Amino acid sequence: MLARQDLVPEPRYQLVPRTLCFVFHGDELLLLRGAPSKRLWAGLYNGIGGHVERGEDVAAAATREVREETGLEVRDLRLRGVVIIDAEPLLGIGLYVFSAQAGTRRVTPSAEGSLTWFARDSLPSQGLVEDLPVLLDRILSAGPTDPPFSAHYSCDADHQLAIRFAPCSGPPHGSS
């Protein structure tokens, strides 16, 4: 039995766990263009992901989200990074970033948006979720034995996204 965790009543910073998975088939990457009805990132390309449900570990959640949003069963699921995102003063998002391999390019559409396979050398440069170019740079340059990166997202004084990577996390590209 697990020991009771000491959850103190005073306000503490808390995280909502989410996953983001970049699914590959050979040299192609699958991206989801958010449905027009989505509250966040409508019409923008992103990887595949969503919330971690109670009782799930992050790998199981990533696998489930890929299956629900694409119909694909994936293999070689690898944790590529962890991003802490400041959302509110005492609430953040813990984003677990994965890569995975699909055995087929045959996808099943979902209400989340439209799915498109892109060759690695012809990924879109427009219409992307704001942090996607930075994450894709990390994912595409990661070797099979590279450790996961660690990053923190916040907004600067001008309300622009500020991304900081830990100095020794993942491929050495610095931060943006």
Image (spheres, grey):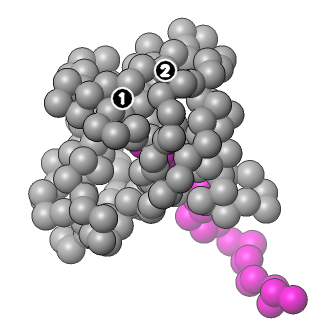
> In the rendered image, which quarter contains the N terminus?
bottom right
Which element is circle 1 on? loop
Q: Residue 129, which numbered label?
A: 1
Nearest-to-viewer mark from 1 and 2:
2
Whether residue 88 is visible to the viewer of this picture, yes or no, is no
Q: Which residue is mark 2?
A: 115
Stretch in magenta: 1-22
The one of 129 and 110 positioned closer to us in this rendering: 110
Q: Residue at x 61, y 59 (%)?
A: 58
The one of 166 and 59 positioned closer to us in this rendering: 59
Q: Residue 114, which numbered label?
A: none
Q: Is residue 12 magenta?
A: yes
Q: Residue at x 73, y 60 (%)?
A: 56
* 71 horizontally vs 96: left or right: right
Q: Residue at x 79, y 62 (%)?
A: 55
Marks 1/2: CA distance? 15 Å
User: In the rendered structure, which amino acid carries the disc numbered 1?
Assistant: Val
User: In the rendered structure, which amino acid carries the disc numbered 2?
Assistant: Leu
Q: Is residue 82 above or below residue 29?
A: below
- State the image quarter where residue 156 is shown: top left
Q: Residue at x 66, y 17 (%)?
A: 111
* 74 horizontally vs 43: left or right: right
Give the image location of residue 94, x and y in percent.
Answer: 52, 57
**First in sequence: mark 1 vs mark 2:** 2
For disc 2, the neighbor class at 10 Å (few under 14, some 14 to 19, many from 20) is many
